[in-house]
Image (cartoon, helix red, strand yellow):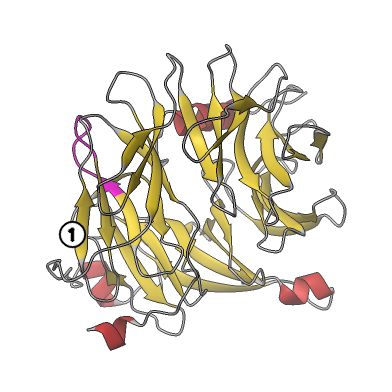
């Protein structure tokens, strides 16, 4: 069995809530405004209030637990309370349950609980790390990754933990599985070629399709995400010695008629990372350090110029769109006092969810709203 030690280190870093920042060289194809940092972030204004619930991990008591808070700040709740680490949270599609990863039984295993923290149940029982759970759209199954067989593989199981199946079964590491919005395809990274490459496959492991291949053995083709319509993917990649956010159209590939079509969304010498699609698929938010701080930028896919939307440096995790697409949540602040920030990318309205002292490592919106299209131009 081949167990890539660099990948193992990446896993340990993610469990601590770290973001892997990829160092890149000077990138060609950027506008002079991007390179010189001429884009300026407008001062945030408070003109409206977000609605919804955010779940997140924090350690105000010395160990990582899961919390929830409504965006008006009135209803905050601690959902787990054990001496062990709790992380890797993912709300179910109907917003009634949360899967998460816990070491409470001596090993990293996947658990599930109701949204209020009750009815906590352990789903995996294998030796070795199980993590990164993703719900199927109908809530019937859960996709995850596991090192139980000596290297990282992609697994699927029923929502109650039964019928756990290894979908990849190679002696090489397979990581970061992401389920397509319709629940029929899986996007993941593989080291089977001796270098990280993106692949897509059916949910039963069939129809394996190689996608983007990096020139580097580590830190390449990161952060893969599906578009809401499942026709495209976005990811961070190193190509020709340069790093950037790419979009790949998979519709032709799925039909078997032609190779995938690439599109470069943005590249910058200071590195861009963490792309996330807006719920309607018209925009992508991502993190960039182009002005000396790691801030959130949003780009319309029919435009080329990204717009900064955060006023402070993002410290942990990746930005998360609200289910209706009106707000982006992110984590900022010093290590001893992290704060959840909410920003409307159109109006620049901004608010903070002040929590108890402690770090915050990751957050998710509870999916309870209907996506709507929000135009930045019309809201200004």
In the image, is 203 to the left or to the right of 295? right
Residue 162 sits above or below residue 213 on the image: above
State the image coordinates of residue 168 (x, y, percent, origin top left): 80, 40
Q: Which residue is mark 1?
A: 311
Q: What residue do we see at 37% from left, 36% from top?
A: 361
Query: In this view of the protein, which residue sits in the foreground, 27 or 200?
Result: 200
| Identity of the residue drawn at 63% across and 23% down | 129
Residue located at (18% from left, 72% from top):
38
* Magenta span dominant secondary structure: loop
Give x and y (percent) for residue 353.
Answer: 23, 48
Q: Position of residue 307 (x, y in %)?
A: 29, 73
Residue 348 on the magenta segment: no
- Which residues fall within the magenta stretch? 331-338
Local crowd at mark 1 within 10 Å, few (<14), some, or many (≥20)? some
Rendered residue at 65%/62% (across/down): 181
Instruction: Decide if residue 292 is in sight here.
Output: no
Q: Would you place residue 201 above or below residue 358 in this image? A: below
Give whichever of 184, 49 is nearer the camera. Answer: 49
Q: Position of residue 230 (x, y in %)?
A: 66, 68
Give the position of the C terminus as an image quadrant.
bottom left
């Amino acid at each position: 069995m081949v167990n890539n030690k660099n990948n193992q280190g990446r896993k340990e870093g993610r469990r601590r809530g770290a973001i892997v920042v990829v160092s890149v060289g000077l990138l060609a194809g950027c506008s002079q405004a991007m390179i010189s940092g001429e884009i300026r972030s407008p001062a945030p204004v408070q003109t409206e209030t977000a609605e919804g619930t955010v779940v997140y991990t924090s350690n105000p008591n010395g160990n990582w637990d899961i919390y929830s808070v409504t965006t008006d700040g009135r209803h905050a709740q601690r959902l787990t309370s054990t001496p062990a680490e709790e992380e890797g949270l993912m709300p179910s599609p109907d917003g009634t349950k949360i899967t998460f990863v816990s070491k409470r039984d001596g090993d990293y295993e996947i658990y599930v609980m109701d949204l209020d923290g009750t009815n906590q149940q352990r789903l995996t029982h294998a030796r070795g790390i199980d993590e990164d759970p993703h719900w199927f759209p109908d809530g019937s199954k859960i996709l995850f990754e596991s090192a139980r067989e000596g290297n990282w593989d992609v697994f699927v199981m029923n929502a109650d933990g039964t019928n756990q199946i290894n979908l990849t079964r190679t002696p090489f590491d397979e990581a970061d599985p992401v389920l397509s919005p319709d629940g029929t395809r899986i996007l993941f990274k593989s080291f089977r070629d001796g270098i990280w490459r993106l692949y897509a496959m059916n949910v039963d492991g069939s129809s394996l399709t190689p996608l983007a291949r990096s020139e580097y053995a580590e830190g390449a083709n990161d952060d893969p995400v599906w578009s809401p319509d499942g026709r495209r993917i976005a990811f961070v990649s190193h190509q020709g010695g340069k790093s950037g956010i790419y979009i790949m159209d998979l519709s032709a590939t799925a039909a078997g008629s032609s190779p995938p079509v690439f599109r470069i969304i943005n590249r910058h010498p200071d590195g861009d990372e963490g792309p996330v699609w807006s719920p309607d698929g018209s925009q992508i938010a991502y993190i960039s350090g182009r002005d000396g701080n790691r801030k959130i930028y949003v780009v319309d896919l029919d435009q080329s110029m990204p717009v900064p939307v955060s006023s402070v440096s993002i410290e942990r995790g990746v930005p998360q769109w609200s289910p209706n697409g009106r707000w982006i949540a992110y984590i900022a602040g010093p290590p001893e006092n992290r704060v959840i920030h909410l920003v409307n990318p159109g109006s620049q309205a901004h608010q903070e969810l002040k929590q108890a002292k402690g770090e915050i490592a990751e957050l998710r919106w509870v999916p309870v709203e209907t996506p709507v299209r929000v135009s930045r131009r019309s809201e200004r």
